[in-house]
Structures are given as C-alpha cells and as structure tokens.
C-alpha cells in the first residue's frame, strides 16, 4: 500500500535476525519487485562483545534456583532476562527465585492480559525490574542497555522462537 500511494519514495527494511526465507516472504507480501530489492548483510555473525556459556543444569530445582540466583545477584546492577519454554515454567521459576534474588522480578508471557503486560514492560524499561522471566513473547523491541545475562532455562520448543535475540 505504501508503494502504491507513494511510488517514488524509497523504503528501507532493517533487521538483525531475519533469515533469507523470511526476507523473501516479507518482500513478496509487500509486493516489492525483486529488481527493486537489495539485501545488505554482513558476511559474519561473529559478535566479539558476546560470550556464550553452557552449563549442565542441576536436577534438584532448589540447587538450580540457588545457583542461578547467586549469579544474578553478582550482576545485580545490570539486567537479566531468563527465558522459559512455557508460562507454567516461568511462574514456577519466579516462585523459586523470589526470596533468593536482590532485585524485583518481572514475569512476562502470553497468558497475561494487555494491561498487566504493559505495566511489566514499563517497569522493565524504567529499570524497576532488573530481572525478567518470560517466554519468547518477551523479546521483541526490548532495546535496553545493560542487559548482562540472557539465560535459557528450558530447551526451546522451536528454535525459531528464540531468533529474536
């Protein structure tokens, strides 16, 4: 519709994580001709400022929660996002961490009503909540500084749900 109304105006679409298949789908749905569409992408996904660490999760939930809380408390001045596969896992982890961490915990998943989600996002953006436990529903448009830790507690149901990071 934009190109139909303003034919001569250039449009730029930007993304950091879109696959080529998703890009082609977007181009097609927006009716942008192939000869009027260019993909500019770096040759590498290497990000030297990021560190990845994989730890074997403790079978005992209390030990796992305590170890996770200890790490979160070490970085208490910065933010932490903890992803879980389901809303039930999010709620269980929030209860497990409540009395172990020094900062307030936000909880974000698709089962919350719109007003609650807006309040939780506002609290996160203002820095009131430094810890966010959520499903993949939390992630789009976060754009906050000082996110020090992103943890995946459960294996994702579908890896594409976590390409938003």
Image (cartoon, rainbow, N blue to C red):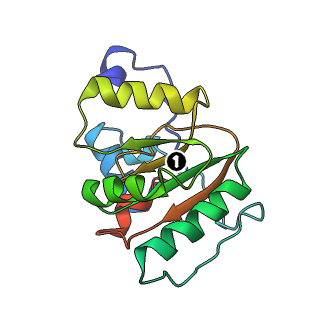
Q: Is residue 42 at least partly visible in the picture? A: no
30 versus 48 height, above or below? above
Where is residue 66 shown, x and y percent of the image? 55, 67
Q: Is residue 48 left or right of residue 155?
A: right
Q: How many marks?
A: 1
Where is residue 37? Give x, y as percent.
46, 44
Residue at 57%, 58% in the rendered image: 150
Residue in the foreground of this view, choosing between 62 and 127: 62
- x%, y% of residue 2? 35, 21
Which of the two residues, 23 or 66, is positioned nearer the viewer here? 66
The residue lying toward the viewer, choosing from 93 and 20, is: 93
Note whether 132 is above or below 156 in the view shown: above
**Crowding near the residue tagged with mark 1, few <14, some 14–19, many ≥20 C-alpha atoms within 10 Å:** few
Q: In which image quadrant can residue 161 be found?
A: bottom left
Q: How far across and how far down the image is residue 32, in percent?
A: 35, 38
Q: Residue furthest top?
A: 5
Image quadrant where one finds the N terminus? top left
The residue singled out by tag 1 in the image is: 38
Work out whether residue 7 can be spotted: yes
Residue found 48% across the figure and 20% down from its top = 9
38 left or right of 161 in image? right
Q: Secondary structure at mark 1?
A: loop
Q: Give the side of residue 94 with respect to residue 112, left or right.
A: right
Q: As drawn, is 85 to the left or to the right of 113?
A: right
Vertical position of residue 128 compared to residue 149: above or below: above
Q: Residue at x 53, y 33 (%)?
A: 124
Q: Residue furthest right?
A: 48
């Amino acid at each position: 519709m934009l190109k139909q109304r303003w034919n001569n105006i250039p449009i730029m679409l930007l993304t950091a994580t879109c696959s080529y298949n998703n890009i082609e789908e977007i181009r097609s749905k927006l009716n942008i001709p192939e000869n009027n569409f260019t993909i500019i992408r770096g040759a590498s996904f290497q990000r030297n400022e990021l560190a990845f660490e994989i730890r074997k999760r403790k079978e005992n939930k209390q030990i796992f929660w305590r170890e996770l809380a200890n790490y979160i408390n070490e970085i208490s001045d910065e933010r932490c996002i903890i992803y879980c596969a389901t809303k039930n896992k999010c709620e269980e982890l929030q209860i497990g961490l409540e009395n172990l961490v020094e900062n307030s915990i936000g909880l974000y998943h698709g089962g919350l009503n719109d007003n609650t989600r807006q309040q939780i996002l506002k609290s996160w953006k203002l820095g009131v909540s430094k810890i966010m436990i959520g499903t993949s529903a939390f992630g789009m448009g976060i754009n906050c500084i000082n996110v020090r830790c992103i943890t995946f507690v459960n294996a994702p149901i579908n890896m594409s749900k976590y390409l938003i990071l």
